[in-house]
Amino acid sequence: MIWEAILNDTISIAVLPGDGIGPEVMVPALAVLHHAAKLYGFNVAALEHPAGAGNYRDHGSALPQSTIDAVAEADATLLAAMGLPDVRYADNTEIVPQIDLREIFGLYGGIRPIRAWLPDAVPLKDPRAADIDFVLVRESTEGLFVGRGKEQTDGDRAVRDIMEVTRETSEKLFHFSFRLAQQRRKHLTLVDKANVLGSMAFFRRIFDEVAEHYPDVTTERAYVDAMAMWMVQRPWDFDVMVTENMFGDILSDLAAGLVGGLGLAPSGDIGDDCAIFQPSHGTAPDIMGQGIANPNAMILSAALMLDWLGRKREDDRMVKAGACIEAAVQAALRSGKALTGDLGGSASTFDAGEAVIVEMKV
Ligand code: ATP
């Protein structure tokens, strides 16, 4: 009984700090996470595991089996950033174990919440820009990324990549997106290129089938090129949008640019039972080691993780802790105390993390 109570009260988190600014932004994110747990009465058992380009260089493996096992066993994983410009595999490809993890664990639902945390950082002039609040769901295991490392080469004449859309993953992705829309403003936009590509017409057909199960959610269908324009012209109109892997990769950076850049863009990669949360930014080698990286995207990723865990375990404490962190980030940014160099301020990574903790209240 006692063990059961302790387990119910404890979330086990696999922590993968990775490379570059990864370990720097992970420190404040863990401090915020532990503080949230203390405020809302649960425990966090966070254990660090090696992965990334530095680990490949020093120990020969970018993603040790022991780390894969730890991710499998943990309730959720926090990952900072991985990859270094001067460390590559022997065939000169980039070291991106975060993509391998998505494939190993079938993390098809890549969520990228985009919100105007700091209205001053939004480059759009329209006053409605302060209301930007949407979630981009990026399919993260197939689409155009499926051909990664498997391209068909015809000598020096041509190289072909593959685009793959499967019914099984698409159905899961759309059910996931509709359920997410139900938790929000109940509007879901499909982004595709169904007018040109057969795989995308198939994607849309499956979307239409799944939509029939969710009559309470209104739907819209958009071609990706038009969506790139609408995201700049009227981003406040969108609630949840769902798209293919490569389109999502591109649109999520555009979306991050709408609200102040990658330092304010958290993300989660979610599968049926496993989920990994990480900032949308990379390892930022140009600023690593200086203690000036913006930790807010990493902190907001920890908040997303708590929300996901709380809903999965039906534990309101974690959902509330996630919301508390989000409110604190917003307050710390708007007070000016969490403004790092990328946001026009001079706060250090440490100062920004501390400013968030100061704002956290039950
Ligand atoms: P990747 O291919 O891993 O996404 P990248 O070089 O394309 O890497 P980032 O590493 O995210 O992208 O860096 C892009 C730019 O944004 C760099 O100038 C970097 O310094 C800046 N940047 C990224 N994340 C942060 C952050 N958390 N704080 C401040 N600046 C950041």
Image: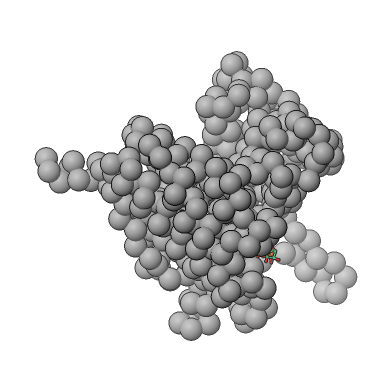
Residue 90 drawn above or below residue 16: below
Image location of residue 55, percent across then percent down: 48, 77
Residue 253 drawn above or below residue 95: above
Q: Closest to the observer: 5 or 349?
A: 349
Q: Quadrant of ligand 1?
A: bottom right
Q: Closest to the observer: 336 or 17?
A: 336
Image location of residue 307, percent across then percent down: 44, 39
Q: Residue at x 56, y 64 (%)?
A: 348
- Which quadrant is home to the N terminus? top left
Q: For residue 70, which quarter of the picture?
A: bottom left
Q: For residue 125, which quarter of the picture?
A: top right
Image location of residue 294, percent across then percent down: 59, 59
Q: How is the image coloured?
A: one colour
Q: Residue at x 82, y 74 (%)?
A: 155
- Which quadrant is home to the C terminus? top left
Q: Residue at x 40, y 67 (%)?
A: 49
Q: Answer left or right for 259 relative to 181.
A: right
Q: Answer left or right for 12 relative to 161.
A: left
In the current view of this chain or complex, which residue is farthest to the right? Answer: 157
Q: Residue at x 65, y 81 (%)?
A: 86
Q: Is residue 157 visible?
A: yes
In the current view of this chain or complex, which residue is farthest to the left? Answer: 1
Q: How many marks?
A: 0
Q: Is residue 111 visible?
A: no
Q: Closest to the observer: 213 or 10?
A: 10
Image location of residue 28, percent across then percent down: 46, 59
